[in-house]
């Protein structure tokens, strides 16, 4: 009598690999692709190397992604040298049922938002743990000019949020843009578009990590049953 085998449970790393490979179908041959930042995107970059001869190159949202792309022989263009991108592929720290996201866990939110804004389509790649009903479970990253840090933290406190300056090696983490990151917990972002619009106007805020204006049109979600495609 044979013993029934239990279904294989994929690790989070394996799920990231699956969605990274699945994103290749959205890359337009002969064009330049927008590339995000983070561990899931690294899987996409590795997969992109398999078709590097079919694309002109990439516009990258961070120094880390640029270095990874170049190491694999993929040309990286300055965003100012490219009018429009057909697609931007990036991960998310959270995504809701409408395609709104929280991003910035990798501290690249400002450049990510810039590249997303010049792209016709945003394809989010994530594992199913990132799908939420309401944004706010993941600490919200906000890139700020250092001198405004305490006042920005105070403004979030008035909204019920607790802000802390992100640290690295015992000092404030410095972004690729020379600024700091404030991570905010305790928020329930029920109206992402209005929230993004408001916080973006606070003096000293460079970029808030809510992506509602530049929300995803497609999300490739890594699940136990394979890649699930969500469209918004």
Image (cartoon, rainbow, N blue to C red):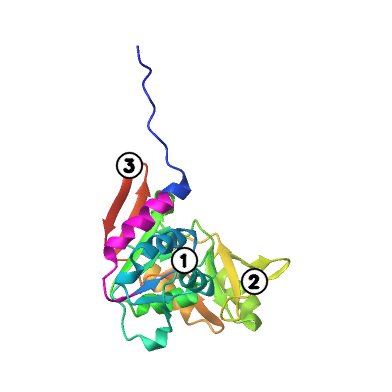
How far from the left and from the top, in percent, is residue 175? 59, 75
**Circle 3 or circle 2, nearest the eye:** 3
Give the vertical position of 40 relative to 89 (above or below): above
Sequence-wise, the earlier of marks 2 and 1 is 1
Q: Residue at x 45, y 67 (%)?
A: 72
Cα distance between the residues tagged 2 and 1: 16 Å
Disc 3, SS:
loop
Q: Which residue is mark 1?
A: 103
**Circle 1 or circle 3, nearest the eye:** 3
Give the vertical position of 46 relative to 178 (above or below): above
Cα distance between the residues tagged 3 and 2: 38 Å
Q: Residue at x 64, y 80 (%)?
A: 146
How far from the left and from the top, in percent, is residue 57? 37, 76
Q: Which residue is mark 3?
A: 225
Disc 1, SS:
loop
Cα distance between the residues tagged 1 and 3: 25 Å
How far from the left and from the top, in percent, is residue 127? 41, 52
Q: Residue at x 43, y 69 (%)?
A: 36
Q: Which residue is mark 2?
A: 173
Sequence-wise, the earlier of marks 3 and 2 is 2
The residue closer to the viewer here, 218 or 160, is: 218
Mark 2–mark 1 CB contact (< 8 Å): no
The residue stretch that appears in magenta: 15-32
Circle 2 Cα neighbour tier, 10 Å, few/some/many (<14 / 14–19 / ≥20): some
Circle 3 Cα neighbour tier, 10 Å, few/some/many (<14 / 14–19 / ≥20): few
Q: Quadrant of residue 153?
A: bottom right
């Amino acid at each position: 009598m044979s013993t029934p085998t239990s279904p294989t449970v994929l690790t989070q790393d394996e799920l990231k690999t699956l969605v990274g490979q699945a994103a290749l179908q959205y890359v337009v041959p002969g064009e330049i692709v927008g590339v995000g930042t983070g561990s899931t995107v690294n899987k996409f970059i590795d997969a992109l190397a398999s078709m590097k001869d079919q694309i002109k190159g990439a516009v990258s949202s961070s120094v880390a992604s640029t270095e990874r792309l170049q190491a694999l022989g993929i040309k990286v263009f300055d965003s100012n040298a490219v009018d429009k991108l057909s697609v931007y592929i990036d991960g998310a720290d959270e995504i809701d049922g409408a395609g709104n996201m929280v991003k910035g866990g990798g501290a690249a939110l400002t450049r990510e938002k810039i590249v997303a804004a010049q792209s016709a389509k945003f394809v989010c790649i994530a594992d199913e743990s990132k799908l939420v009903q309401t944004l706010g479970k993941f600490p919200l990253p906000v890139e700020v000019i250092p001198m405004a840090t305490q006042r920005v933290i105070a403004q979030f406190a008035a909204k019920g949020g607790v802000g802390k300056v992100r640290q690295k090696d015992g000092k404030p983490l410095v972004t690729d843009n020379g600024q700091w990151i404030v991570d905010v917990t305790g928020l329930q972002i029920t109206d992402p578009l209005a929230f993004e619009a408001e916080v973006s106007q606070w003096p000293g805020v460079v970029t808030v990590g809510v992506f509602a204006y530049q929300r995803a049109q497609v999300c490739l979600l890594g699940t136990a049953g394979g890649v699930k495609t969500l469209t918004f």
